[in-house]
């Protein structure tokens, strides 16, 4: 099992980064987010997932552990292959993915090329409980602050986001309830995390 590759990026194209390690170039299928994260860097480390099928052996690489975990969750869904998972994670951050699943925002997935309504519903249905138990975003970590806002009430969105990060609905509601409702979702999450970490 290849856990990670570290070295110089010698080639990139759409959805692929080739990392040279000890004279060997490892072609890693990856997301646009990871390609942007490693752009211009002399040396990079990609966390990897090796996919072995009857017709292909492919290595997938990611700049963050959150993105790798999101990828693993997606390919565990019936009918979602690595290519579809890469497309989804190229269209949204891991935190936005977690929030979309937690709030059953299937439109976020159908906006991705090649993802139909049935597949989007399956992703939401199969991963909702898993997201709640094993959140993609590290509790209180920096990734939690990049949750993309979706249409709706800022207070309810902030509460949902905090639930995705592992807090109970009661804890989330208590923290958000102390804030000015005119704040943005991101600001509410930041202030709530500070409050909850001090409990």
Image (spheres, rainbow, N blue to C red):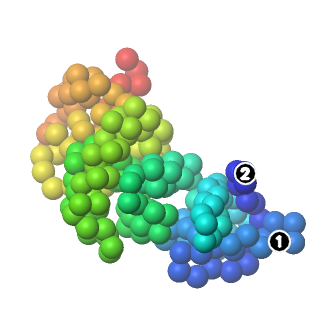
* C-alpha span from label 2 to label 1: 16 Å
Of helix, strand and loop, which one carries label 1? strand
Q: Quadrant of residue 59?
A: bottom right
For residue 85, side relative to residue 1 (left or right): left
* Between 72 and 144, the one nearer to me in the picture: 72
Q: Residue at x 23, y 45 (%)?
A: 103
* Coordinates of residue 63 in the picture (x, y in percent): 59, 58
Viewer-nearest of labels 2 and 1?
2
Q: In the image, which disc is placed on residue 126?
A: none
- Residue, far front: 54
Q: Quadrant of the C terminus?
A: top left
Q: Label 1 belongs to which residue?
A: 24
Q: Residues within 10 Å of mark 1 (few under 14, many from 20)?
A: few
Above or below, comparing residue 170 to residue 78 in the picture: above
Q: In the image, which disc is placed on residue 1?
A: 2
Determine whether label 2 and label 1 are within 8 Å by CB. no
Of helix, strand and loop, which one carries label 2? loop
Residue 191 visible in the current orientation: no
Count of number-bearing discs: 2
* Coordinates of residue 80 in the picture (x, y in percent): 40, 60
Residue 12 visible in the current orientation: yes
Q: Quadrant of residue 56?
A: bottom right
Q: How crowded is mark 2: few (under 14 residues within 10 Å), some or many (20 or more)?
A: few
Q: Which residue is drawn at 38% across and 38% down?
A: 130
* Between 188 and 92, the one nearer to me in the picture: 92
* Between 163 and 186, the one nearer to me in the picture: 163
* Coordinates of residue 195 in the picture (x, y in percent): 34, 26
First reached walking from the N terminus: tag 2 or tag 1: 2
Above or below, comparing residue 78 to residue 140 in the picture: below
Q: Residue at x 27, y 46 (%)?
A: 125
* Coordinates of residue 13 in the picture (x, y in percent): 58, 82
For residue 69, side relative to residue 6 (left or right): left
């Amino acid at each position: 099992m290849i856990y990670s590759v570290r070295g110089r990026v010698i080639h990139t194209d759409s959805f692929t980064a080739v990392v040279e390690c000890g004279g060997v170039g490892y072609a890693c299928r990856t997301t646009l987010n990871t390609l942007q994260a490693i752009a211009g860097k002399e040396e990079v480390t990609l966390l990897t997932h090796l996919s072995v099928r009857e017709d292909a052996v492919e290595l997938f690489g990611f700049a963050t552990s959150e993105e790798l975990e999101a990828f693993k969750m997606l390919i565990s869904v019936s009918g979602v292959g690595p290519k579809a998972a890469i497309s989804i994670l190229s269209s949204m951050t891991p935190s936005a993915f977690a929030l979309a699943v937690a709030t059953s925002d299937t439109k976020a997935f159908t906006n991705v090329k090649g993802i139909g309504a049935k597949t989007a519903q399956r992703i939401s249905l199969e991963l909702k409980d898993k997201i709640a138990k094993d959140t993609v975003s590290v509790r209180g970590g920096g990734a939690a602050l990049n949750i993309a806002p979706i249409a709706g009430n800022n207070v309810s969105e902030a509460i949902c986001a905090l639930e995705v990060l592992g807090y109970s609905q009661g804890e989330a509601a208590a923290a958000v309830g102390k804030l000015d409702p005119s704040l943005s979702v991101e600001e509410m999450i930041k202030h709530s995390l500070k409050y909850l970490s001090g409990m």
